[in-house]
Image: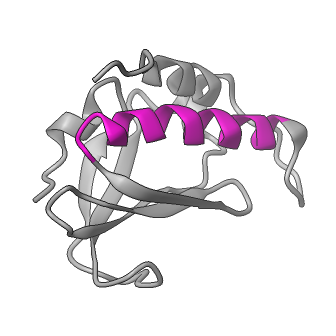
Amino acid sequence: MNQKMIDMNKILEKLKQGFESSSGKTPEWKEFCKLFKSEFSKELKSIGATDIVFGNGHFYISGFFTADSGQIYYFSLSDVRGMEFQNSIDFLYRTAEHYRDWTGGGNQWIKLEQGMAKRMNIR
């Protein structure tokens, strides 16, 4: 399978630049969401995930995907403001029963980085 080059480092670079706090979605936040959607989709597709959906709110992004086993997963990158001061960024994911199950299974955390999808505990 010929996949486009995955570069999660672009996401980390944007997070390390920080975000202007605002009461609405800023242009830089909208640009970040577009980048995150592109790069994280590539990560997920590298492990055979399908039906990837994203939603974003006030400085957070979350969504769902289906593993090749058919298991649905929820993911979330919480409020990104202030992440420029963190040494590493943790990313939440967990099993879900359906695409509106925001409570799902037990929380699992993984470091946001290149190749993270292959290290996720996906079944």
Quadrant in the picture for the C terminus: bottom left
| Figure check: 32 above or below 120 | above
- Quarter of the view holding residue 59: bottom right
Extreme residue toward the front, this view? 1
Report the label total.
0
Vertical order, 53 against 20 (above or below)? below
Residue 53: x percent and y percent?
Answer: 52, 60
Give the residue drawn at x 20%, y 56%. 68
Point 59% across, 24% down: residue: 16
* Quadrant in the rendering for residue 64: bottom left
Nearer the observer, 69 or 20:
69
Asked if 31 appears above or below 26 in the picture, the reply is above
For this view, does 42 lie left or right of residue 16? left
Residue depicted at x 20% and y 74%: 106
Instruction: Give the image quarter of residue 60.
Output: bottom right
Magenta span: chief secondary structure: helix
The residue segment tinted magenta is 28-48
Residue at image location 16% in from the left, 38% down from the top: 119
116 left or right of 43 in image: left
The answer to whether residue 25 is above or below residue 17 is: below
Asked whether residue 68 is drawn in magenta, I would say: no
Residue 97, percent across and down?
Answer: 29, 84
Q: Is residue 119 left or right of residue 81?
A: left
